Amino acid sequence: MAPVKHPRELWLPLALMVSFALTRIPGVLPLNFSAAYALAFCAGVYLPARMAWWLPLSVLLLTDVSLNLFYYDASPLSGYLLMQYAGYAVLILLGRQFRAGSSWLALLGGGLAGAVLFYLITNTAAWFQNPEYPKTLLGWIQALTTGLPGYPPTWTFFRNTLLSGGLFTGLFVGAMKLTEAREPEEETEADPVEDAEPEESKA
C-alpha cells in the first residue's frame, strides 16, 4: 500500500473506526439506524483500495464478535451475519464506483442506493433462512414489508436504514467537501511565489 501522504488519510480511518464503534453500542441508536451503512460506502469512495476493504470489515467483525460474546450471549458468527457482511461488501464496492470529487448530491444518492441494496440483501437472507416465512413471492414481500406477527414491521427497519444511510452519508461527505475546500487555500499560502520571468530588453 502506498504511504500516507496527507493528514486526511490519517484522520479519516480513525473517524471510521470511532464511528463504527460508537454507533454499534446497543441502545445508542434505534434498530437499523446506524452509521455503518454510510461509512462502508464512504470507505469505498475515499480510502485507498486495500484499506477500503480491510478497515471497515475488520472493525465490523471485531464489534460483532464482541457484542455476540459479551452482550447478546450468542454464537460469534452465523449465516445471517455473513449475509450482512455481503451487504457491507456491496456498499464498499458501490463506493469504489464513485470519485471523491463527485458532487455532494451524487454521493448522497450513492449512499441512499447502498442503504436500499443492504436492506434488500439482508432481508432476503432473513426470508430465506427463517422457516416461518413462506418460500414464495408473497413470503419474500412479507419479509420486506410487514415481517412476522409479534415483531415490529420490517418496513420500519427499512425506514431507519434509509434515513441513517442518507443522514450519515450527507454529513460525512459534507465534512469531506469542507476539508477539501480548505486545502487549496492552505497550499496556496504555503507555496513560494515564483520569480517573474525577466522582461525582454527593448531594442
Image (cartoon, rainbow, N blue to C red):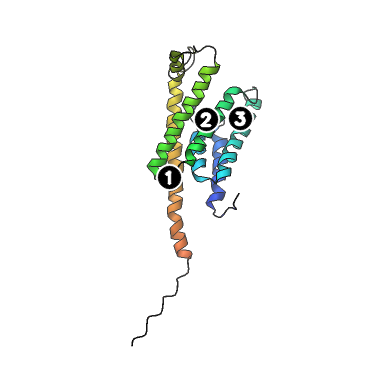
Q: Which residue is mark 3?
A: 64
Percent x, y of residue 37: 49, 34
Pointer 2 residue: 87
Mark 2 neighbour class, 10 Å CA radius: few under 14, some 14 to 19, many 20 or more: many
Q: Amino acid at mark 3?
A: Asp
User: For this rendering, which residue is in front, 22 or 54?
Assistant: 54
103 vs 2, left or right, is: left
| Residue 37 image label | none
Give the residue type that dot 2 points to: Gly
Who comes first in sequence, dot 1 or dot 3?
3
Disc 2 to disc 1, C-alpha distance: 24 Å
Identify the residue at image location x=58%, y=52%: 4
Residue 194: horizontal and vertical position, in percent? 45, 72
Camera-nearest label, 2 or 1: 2
The CA distance from mark 3 to mark 2 is 15 Å
Q: CA distance from mark 1 to mark 3?
A: 28 Å
- Label 1 CA crowd tier, 10 Å (few <14, some 14–19, many 20+): some
| Residue type, mark 1 in image | Gly
Query: In terms of sequence position, does the residue under pointer 3 or pointer 2 come before the other?
Result: 3
Which residue is found at the position 48% from the left and 37% from the top?
Answer: 94
Which quadrant, please, contains the C terminus? bottom left
Is residue 31 at least partly visible in the picture? no
SS type, badge 3: helix
Q: Report the disc number at residue 174.
A: 1
Q: Position of residue 102 (x, y in %)?
A: 41, 46
Of the residues tagged 3 and 2, which is closer to the observer?
2
The residue positioned farthest toward the left in the image shown: 203
